[in-house]
Image (spheres, rainbow, N blue to C red):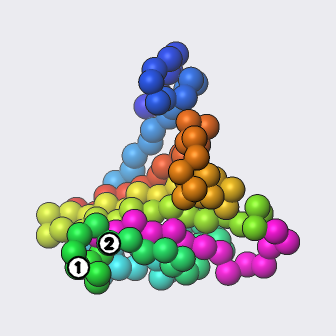
C-alpha cells in the first residue's frame, strides 16, 4: 500500500508505503514472542543485523517491572568512534493472551538526546517497523 501525504499536522510530506506478510510458525505464541523481542534479534532482523544486542533502557508499561509490556532502547555492542555514530533501536513490546506486538525503529544518539532533554521534537522522524503475533 502506498499513500501520498501532501500536508498534515505531525506527518511528513511524501509517500509512505506499507507492506504485510503472513506466515504460520508451528510454535508456542509466548516462546516466539520471547525469541523475537531482543535476545535473538540479530538472527531475524535485517535492519538490526549485528546492531541491537542489549537493553540500554527498559521502561515497563505498568506496575509490574517484569512485564513484557515495555518500551526499550536497545544498543549496539559494536565499537563506534563517537556517540553520534551509535545506532540504537527504540522498541515497544506488548504481549497478551490474544496476541503480541513488537514495534521498533532505528534511532541515533543525537536524536535520543533531543527527546530526553525535552527539546523541540518537530524534526524527529521515525520509520517504524513491526510485527504482530496471533496465537
- Look at the numbered disc 2 and give the secondary structure of its residue: strand
Picture coordinates of residue 117, whole percent (x, y): 57, 56
SS at mark 1 in the image: loop
Q: Locate the C terminus by quadrant.
A: bottom left
Along the horizontal axis of the image, is 23 left or right of 49? left
The residue drawn where x is 50% and y is 17% is: 7
Could you tell whether 18 is left or right of 88 in the image? Answer: left
Q: In the rendered structure, are the residues bearing label 2 and label 1 in contact, judged by CB atoms less than 8 Å apart?
A: yes
Which residue is most to the right? Answer: 81
Q: Is residue 71 magenta?
A: yes
Which residue carries the number 2 mark? 60
Q: Which residues are magenta?
A: 69-82
Q: Which quadrant holds the N terminus?
A: top left
**Distance from the alpha carbon under mark 2 to that under mark 1:** 7 Å
Residue 33 seen in this snapshot:
yes
According to the image, label 1 marks what residue?
Answer: 64
Q: Residue furthest left?
A: 97
Q: Position of residue 8 (x, y in %)?
A: 46, 20
Question: In this orientation, which residue lies closer to the viewer: 110 or 95?
Answer: 110
Amino acid at each position: 500500500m502506498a499513500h501520498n501525504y501532501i500536508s498534515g499536522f505531525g506527518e511528513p510530506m511524501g509517500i509512505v508505503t506499507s507492506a504485510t506478510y503472513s506466515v504460520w510458525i508451528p510454535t508456542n505464541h509466548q516462546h516466539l514472542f520471547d525469541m523475537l523481542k531482543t535476545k535473538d534479534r540479530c538472527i531475524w532482523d535485517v535492519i538490526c543485523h549485528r546492531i541491537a544486542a542489549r537493553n540500554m533502557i527498559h521502561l515497563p508499561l505498568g506496575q509490574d517491572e517484569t512485564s513484557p509490556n515495555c518500551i526499550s532502547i536497545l544498543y549496539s555492542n559494536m565499537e563506534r568512534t563517537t556517540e553520534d555514530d551509535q545506532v540504537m533501536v527504540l522498541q515497544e513490546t506488548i504481549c497478551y493472551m490474544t496476541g503480541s506486538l513488537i514495534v521498533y525503529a532505528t534511532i541515533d544518539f543525537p536524536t535520543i538526546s533531543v527527546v530526553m532533554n525535552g527539546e523541540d521534537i518537530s524534526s524527529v522522524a521515525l520509520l517504524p517497523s513491526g510485527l504482530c503475533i496471533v496465537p
